[in-house]
């Protein structure tokens, strides 16, 4: 596997300031205003990386950029060759783009759902320690930011792109009454990206922010009530990745999952299966 982890995501939202306040007061991310002359309004920290998410103004909410961290420049070269052999147009990130992302080197291309997809190496870590305004610790490290789940009517095309070209594994599939999910991994995290078949619309389903304890999940659930944040799905536990979590609707319309206790995948023994139900909970909220 050449791709190491989900490094960062760009988020478009009609109201970046409202999303930044939500990120700080409900999720527990550290919010830093961006340079006033650029398109980015805020950058969001959750660990020692300079940022894991950023917010830009957009007419509709959703992920606009997905950045995958690779080991080094050689890995970028190898992935570039693989992409070009598959007929994908790959562009080299400019010095300005690399400075903006705080990376040494970056290439980008159009991935599934038309989303700008970046491969980068040499991330510059922040000089200051991450401190959550709510005292929350997030699970990142070698597992990366968390995961992002996208909905599309072209789900098999997206899965094939990530598995056959980018080298992800198919961890599991899940056939639920509300859709079929395909979970794809690139490190010990069960999945760093997933796709759900949707014939109604295309876009972002949710982003996971994993915390270190079940108590932090409960506290986050309390904060959703305190701030009037609507739930997407109730508290529950997934059968495939073991995540104890709930889903809430962010101010941009897509979901944020807050969870703890996700399983670690051992590539040498892992067996992909198809699930049809969660262990308990996660009931959709109308």
Image (spheres, rainbow, N blue to C red):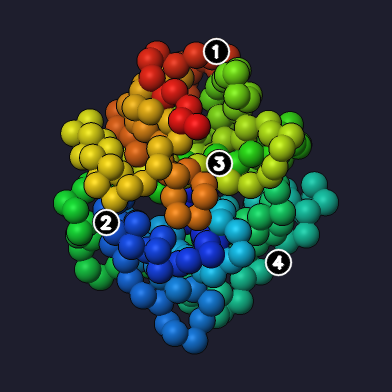
Q: Which comes before the other along the chain, label 2 or label 3?
A: 2
73 over 242 or under it: above or below: below
**CB within 8 Å, label 4 to label 3:** no
Residue 244 appears at what percent x and percent y?
Answer: 33, 26
Q: Label 2, label 4: how many angstroms apart (C-alpha)?
A: 37 Å
78 over 256 or under it: above or below: below
Residue shown at 56% from the left, 56% from the top: 61
Task: Looking at the picture, tell me which residue is in the foreground, 39 or 85.
Answer: 39
Q: Secondary structure at mark 3?
A: strand
Asked where in the image residue 108 lies, by quadrant, the reply is bottom right
44 horizontally vs 177: left or right: left
Q: Label 4, label 1: how many angstroms apart (C-alpha)?
A: 40 Å
Mark 1 residue crowding within 10 angstroms, few (<14) / some (14–19) / many (20+): few
Q: Which mark is residue 205?
A: 3
Residue shown at 42% from the left, 24% from the top: 282
Q: Which comes before the other along the chain, label 4 or label 3?
A: 4
Q: Label 2, label 1: how many angstroms apart (C-alpha)?
A: 35 Å
Q: Secondary structure at mark 4?
A: strand
Residue 109 appears at what percent x and percent y?
Answer: 69, 59
184 horizontally vs 43: left or right: right
Q: Which residue is mark 2?
A: 25
Mark 4 residue crowding within 10 angstroms, few (<14) / some (14–19) / many (20+): few
Q: Label 1, label 3: how many angstroms apart (C-alpha)?
A: 19 Å
Q: Is residue 240 visible?
A: yes
Q: Label 4, label 3: how many angstroms apart (C-alpha)?
A: 27 Å
């Amino acid at each position: 596997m050449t791709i190491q982890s989900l490094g960062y995501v760009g988020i478009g939202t009609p109201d970046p300031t409202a999303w930044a306040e939500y990120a700080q007061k409900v999720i527990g991310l550290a919010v830093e205003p961006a340079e006033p002359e650029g398109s980015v309004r805020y950058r969001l920290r959750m660990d020692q990386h300079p940022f894991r998410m950023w917010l830009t103004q957009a007419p509709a909410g959703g992920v606009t950029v997905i950045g995958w961290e690779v080991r080094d420049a050689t890995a970028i070269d190898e992935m570039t060759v693989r992409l070009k052999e598959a007929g994908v147009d790959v562009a080299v990130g400019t010095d300005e783009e690399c400075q903006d992302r705080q990376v040494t080197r970056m290439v980008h291309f159009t991935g599934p759902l038309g989303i700008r997809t970046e491969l980068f190496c040499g991330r510059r870590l922040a000089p200051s320690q991450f401190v959550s305004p709510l005292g929350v610790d997030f699970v990142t490290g070698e597992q990366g930011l968390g995961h992002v789940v996208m909905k599309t009517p072209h789900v098999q095309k997206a899965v094939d792109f990530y598995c056959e070209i980018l080298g992800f594994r198919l961890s599991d599939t899940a056939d639920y009454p509300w859709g079929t999910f395909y979970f794809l991994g690139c490190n010990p995290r069960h999945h760093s990206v997933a796709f759900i078949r949707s014939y109604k619309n295309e876009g972002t389903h949710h982003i996971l922010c994993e915390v270190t304890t079940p108590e932090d999940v409960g506290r986050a659930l309390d904060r959703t009530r305190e701030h009037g944040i609507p739930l997407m799905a109730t508290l529950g536990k997934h059968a495939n990745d073991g995540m104890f979590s709930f889903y809430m609707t962010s101010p941009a319309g897509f979901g944020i999952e807050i969870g703890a206790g996700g399983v670690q995948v051992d590539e040498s023994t892992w067996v992909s299966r198809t699930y049809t139900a969660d262990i308990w909970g996660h009931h959709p909220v109308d």
